Amino acid sequence: MKKLIFLIPIVIGIIVLVYFSFPKIPKTYELPKCNETVRKNCDYEGIKIISNLDSLLWMKENVPSDSVVLSWWNYGKELEKISGLGPVIKNPSQFLFDSGGVRKSETIKEFEPEEKFNSVAQFFTTDDEAIALDIAKKYYVDYVFITKDDSKEFPWINFIAGQRASIRVPKDVYKNPGIYCLSKPKTEPGQMSCGEFASEGRGIWIFGPLTSTEYAYERVKNPIHWYRGYSGPILGIFQEDSQLVPIVYHFGNKFITNHLVYFSSENELKVSDLSNFNTKFNATLFNYTLERIDGLVWLQSDFKYAVYFPPSIKDSMFTKLFFYNAERLDNFELVYSTPEVKLFKVI
């Protein structure tokens, strides 16, 4: 029996040696299968769906099969495989990949030409409809496909389009809500890197939409709605008499935005210009003058979701299409709409 006891460490050693000698099979995340309730971020017959399966199937039945669709790159393959349509781009560019704009879990085998990829980014970021139309014509675009999740991708879209937030000192960060740090790209001359802001030396500052969802804030009774994202600024929607007033909190600074877009009780799109609104109003906590910023706050019709757009992107084609339903555009017509996905025909 004693001899057997002495064998125990040897047996354990052999087991450990065998365990560490064989290569491990890495754990992989498998998407859930699409079903009647799961219609996005799911697997449909081996195809990854990140937009919305119902929208893709609708397009398959209602959009001519020879149509060309402009969207951001990550929807290109599902548009092609599910809807049978021709995407302008369906892969990232090498520059986006090298800059850290592609998730590590993505398997990339091909890259789009830089010029074409940059043109798609410029389409979404420009505030000039004529420029956007020229890009659409250049690539024979029949439809434009946009999702609400493009708000999350917009800092990278802005980056590819060449848009930059001019940040030279920390004060510039504090005064600019809606600012994002892309940590991997090399800092450009004359600018403070976002890594430097956090004691390191890389990164570029980019403007993008601040997306937030409603949350409770019980200490203050005057605000009718508060919104907060995963990080960064907080949005507050106050009511002063009959006027809704959007406030943005950012690094201790409080801004009133000049523009508010919301829906009336009849579900009619309303646009409020607050550029002449008194910045010293009688809301709880505010007995002093707020700073003014020429941004825009958009409220979903059920008031459960809000988006703040910094001044540099509040008039972008992305904003005019998804959040204004192309009502201010002459050459794009809304033909399909859900809270998640919108499709526009180039006319």
Image: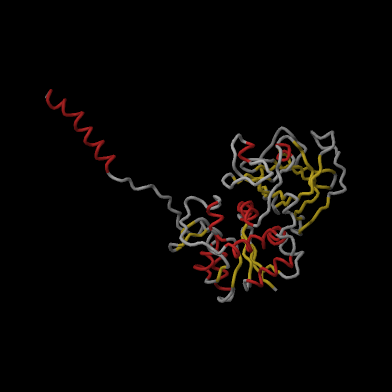
Vertical arrangement, residue 268 with respect to residue 210, above or below: below
Q: Quadrant of residue 139?
A: bottom right
Total numbered labels placed on residues in the image: 0
Vertical arrangement, residue 260 with respect to residue 133, above or below: above
Q: Position of residue 152 (x, y in %)?
A: 61, 51
Between 134 and 85, the residue placed more toward the observer is: 134
Instruction: Name the residue located 48 percent from the left edge and 54 percent from the top edge.
Output: 106
Vertical arrangement, residue 139 with respect to residue 53, above or below: below
Instruction: Name the residue located 58 percent from the left edge and 68 percent from the top edge.
Output: 88
Between 39 and 178, the residue placed more toward the observer is: 178
Q: Is residue 252 left or right of residue 66?
A: right
Identify the residue at the far top of this view.
2
Between 42 and 156, the residue placed more toward the observer is: 156
Q: Position of residue 183 (x, y in %)?
A: 58, 44
Q: Quadrant of the N terminus?
A: top left
Q: Quadrant of residue 147?
A: bottom right
Q: Position of residue 207 (x, y in %)?
A: 68, 49
Between 141 and 61, the residue placed more toward the observer is: 141
Q: Quadrant of residue 340?
A: bottom right
Q: How is the image coloured?
A: secondary structure
Q: Quadrant of the C terminus?
A: bottom right
Identify the residue at the far front of this view.
189
Q: Is residue 78 left or right of residue 191?
A: left
Q: Position of residue 308 (x, y in %)?
A: 71, 48
Vertical arrangement, residue 51 with respect to residue 216, above or below: below
Q: Is residue 319 left or right of residue 283?
A: left
Q: Is residue 134 left or right of residue 50?
A: right
